[in-house]
Image: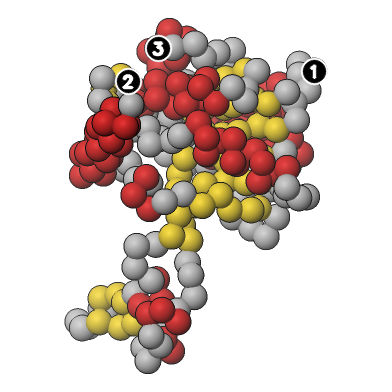
Amino acid sequence: MNIAVIPARGGSKRIPRKNIKPFCGRPMIAWSILAAQQSGLFQRIIVSTDDPEIAELARAYGAETPFVRPPELSDDHAGTTEVVAHAAQWLNQRGVAFDALCCIYATAPLLHPADLSRGLEALQSGNWAYAFSVSEFASSVFRAFQALPEGGLGMLFPEHFPTRSQDLPSALHDAAQFYWGRPDAWLQQLRIFDAHSTPVLLPRWRVQDIDDMDDWVRAELIFKAIQAQAGAQA
């Protein structure tokens, strides 16, 4: 059995009510639920929330809300691993056996069901604890610099100043869409960003973290472009 867990607390600050704010015709979280359903991979899709409105809306779109997330896991400091571990423990205590659990972010409208399938295949391709979505940085982090307190700039990696861009190491970042994990990995709260995890590469143009309204507008533009392209090819 595979289970999806979608964390969706009610107290988002930078974009109020972000998880259920309308996004291209549906509440934001509905797109994550829909992607999980369309993948055909999950026997249960659970939304972990502390918010009654989010819970009601999640159920309306076909997800389960079998528990209320506790307050200590519903503030700004609660991490993804702890939240998903709580869901895994809840299932474990009720004798629900599962082979893999996938955390899907509630703010992942660009997620494709096929990527979830690739993620499960990656998890099963070896003795991995996790398989999660990543993408390449648009510009090399090894050419990054920072503003100095006294003014001026300093390279973060000055040793790479003379290195040609095509010779710089590749660098990846979390695509913030999904995290497949084995039961023990979640229950033991193993760190996701570590050597026991394998990456699932997504194209940069289909990845957008949504933390503020600039991100939101950019994500909507990408989403509409993808939909228009799909319609033209139909």
Q: Residue at x 64, y 53 (%)?
A: 198
Q: Residue at x 62, y 18 (%)?
A: 44
* Quarter holding residue 41: top right
> Does residue 99 lie above or below 146 as drawn?
above
Callout 3: helix, strand or loop?
helix
The answer to whether mark 2 and mark 3 are in CB contact below 8 A is: yes
Q: Is residue 75 visible?
A: no
Point out the tag, 2 or 3, that comes first from the N-terminus: 2
Which residue is the site of mark 2?
Answer: 27
* Quarter holding residue 216: top left
Q: Amino acid at mark 1?
A: Gly
Q: Residue furthest front?
A: 233
> Does residue 61 lie above or below 204 as drawn?
above
Callout 1: helix, strand or loop?
loop
Q: Amino acid at mark 2?
A: Pro
Q: Nearer the viewer, residue 94 or 201?
A: 201
Point out the tag, 1 or 2, that comes first from the N-terminus: 2
> Does residue 201 lie above or below 96 as drawn?
below
Which residue is the site of mark 3?
Answer: 57
The mark found on residue 133 in the picture is none
Marks 1/3: CA distance?
27 Å
Which residue is the site of mark 1?
Answer: 95
Q: Amino acid at mark 3?
A: Leu
**Whole-percent x, y for residue 156 in the image:** 38, 79
How crowded is the residue under tag 1: few (<14 C-alpha within 10 Å), some, or many (20+)? few
Q: Nearer the viewer, residue 146 or 105?
A: 105
Callout 2: helix, strand or loop?
strand
